[in-house]
Image: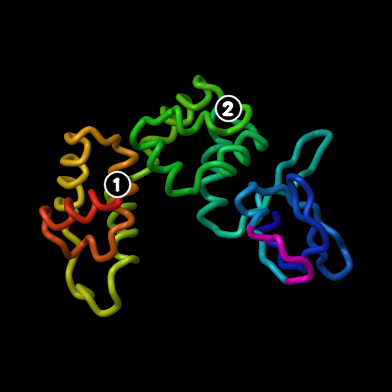
């Protein structure tokens, strides 16, 4: 099983990148978001690989981060979501936005992907919602955005984050919008509910 391929970009196609690795060209199918980042030619990149093996085909699907690969493999575990549909979803939604869409039950956001209808989007939500943890995701994101040296020794107050998200939804924002806004606030884990709410609202205005 191939875990990753590190090589020089030889060509970028509509839905794949060709990596030259010691004189062998590997066609690696990838999301539009990742392909857009690989716009430069003749530079070395590492792609984390999922290998799909069928009776009449062996294909490689690659991603720039392990997080994307993890999310892709979750997607294709959903009944009715094949390798191409999984790429299509990750072409229109980042991993974090997709996680938020799943948690908030926002099937419409997932149907932005070509070839994914409402029934398919609802299956993604139904089958993956128990595998995504909103609280730990938001806590991780807000900790990453905190200023260096601030609140290093403190545990993040997850109740503040949860209550602020509830307050935003009470004001009419969707759970997806609320989670996105909180994620964009630097140092959110060290704020009071009132302060975090004010800062999150600024992100939404």
Taking the magenta stretch, the answer to whether it contains residue 40 is yes
- Specify few, some or many for label 2: CA neighbours under 10 Å numbering under 14, 14-19, or 20 or more: some
Coordinates of residue 5 in the picture (x, y in percent) = 71, 63
Residue assigned mark 1: 204
Highlighted range, magenta: 37-43
Q: Quadrant of residue 150?
A: bottom left
> Does 12 sit left or right of 105 as displayed?
right
- Specify few, some or many for label 1: CA neighbours under 10 Å numbering under 14, 14-19, or 20 or more: few
Task: For marks 2 and 1, give the CA distance.
Answer: 28 Å
Label 1: state its secondary structure: helix
Depicted 189 relative to depicted 55: above or below = below
Is 91 or 202 nearer to us in this picture? Answer: 202
Residue assigned mark 2: 116
Q: Residue drawn 16% across and 41% down? A: 167
Q: Residue drawn 59% across and 43% down? A: 91
Quarter that holds the N terminus: bottom right
Depicted 124 relative to depicted 167: above or below = above
């Amino acid at each position: 099983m191939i875990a990753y391929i590190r090589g020089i970009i030889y060509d970028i196609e509509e839905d794949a990148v060709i990596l030259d690795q010691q004189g062998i060209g590997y066609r690696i199918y990838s999301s539009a978001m990742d392909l857009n980042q690989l716009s430069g030619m003749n530079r070395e990149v590492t792609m984390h690989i999922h290998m799909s093996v069928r009776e009449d085909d062996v294909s490689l699907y690659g991603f720039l981060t392990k997080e994307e690969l993890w999310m892709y493999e979750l997607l294709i575990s959903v009944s009715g979501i094949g390798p191409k549909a999984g790429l299509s979803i990750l072409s229109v939604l980042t991993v974090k936005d997709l996680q938020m869409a799943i948690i908030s039950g926002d099937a419409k956001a997932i149907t932005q992907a070509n070839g994914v209808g409402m029934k398919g989007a609802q299956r993604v939500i139904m089958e993956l919602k128990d595998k995504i943890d909103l609280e730990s995701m938001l806590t991780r994101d807000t900790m990453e955005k905190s200023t260096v040296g601030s609140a290093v020794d403190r545990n993040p107050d997850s109740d503040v984050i949860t209550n602020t998200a509830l307050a935003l939804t009470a004001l009419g924002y969707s759970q997806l919008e609320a989670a996105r806004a909180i994620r964009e606030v630097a140092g959110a884990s060290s704020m009071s509910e009132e302060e975090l709410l004010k800062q999150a609202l600024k992100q939404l205005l």
